[in-house]
Image (cartoon, rainbow, N blue to C red):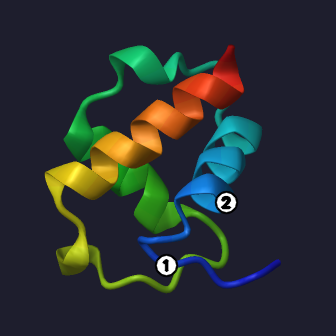
Amino acid sequence: MNELDWLDINDIAIELYDNFPDIDPQWISFPDLHKKVCELDGFIGNPTKSNEQILEAIQMTWIEEYK
């Protein structure tokens, strides 16, 4: 598995899709999304370095994967 950081938005979205197939990303809160990203295998990003813009981009990409 490759290391993931906050700006690896597409790779993070794919990992979330693969790891949480029962979650509809349209309804996930940003705190829950942040927690799930930080818990992904291979995630090396600093938990304090995310922001709403990054989380929204991850969520939107995950929604595209989910459809």
Who's the residue at 17% across and 50% down the image? 52
Q: Disc 1 residue type?
A: Asp
Q: Residue at x 42, y 66 (%)?
A: 38
Answer with mark 1 or mark 2, whichever residue precedes in sequence. 1
- Quadrant location of residue 28? top left
Residue situated in front as seen by the camera: 21 or 63: 63
Task: Say if residue 48 shows up in the picture.
Answer: yes
Residue at the image position 68 percent from the left and 37 percent from the top = 17
Can you identify the residue that label 1 sits on? 5
**Residue 23 in the image: above or below residue 11:** above
Question: Looking at the image, is 65 positioned above or below residue 58?
Answer: above
Crowdedness near tag 2: few (<14), some (14–19) or many (≥20) residues, C-alpha within 10 Å: some
> With respect to residue 53, does 63 lie above or below?
above
Residue wearing tag 2: 11
The amino acid pointed to by label 2 is Asp
Query: In the rendered image, is residue 21 in sight?
Result: no
What x and y, as percent, mark residue 9? 52, 58
Q: Position of residue 58 (x, y in %)?
A: 44, 47
Q: Is residue 63 left or right of residue 7?
A: right
Q: Quadrant of the C terminus?
A: top right
Q: Is residue 65 left or right of residue 34?
A: right
Q: Residues within 10 Å of mark 1 (few under 14, many from 20)?
A: some
Q: Is residue 58 above or below residue 25?
A: below
Q: Quadrant of residue 59?
A: top left
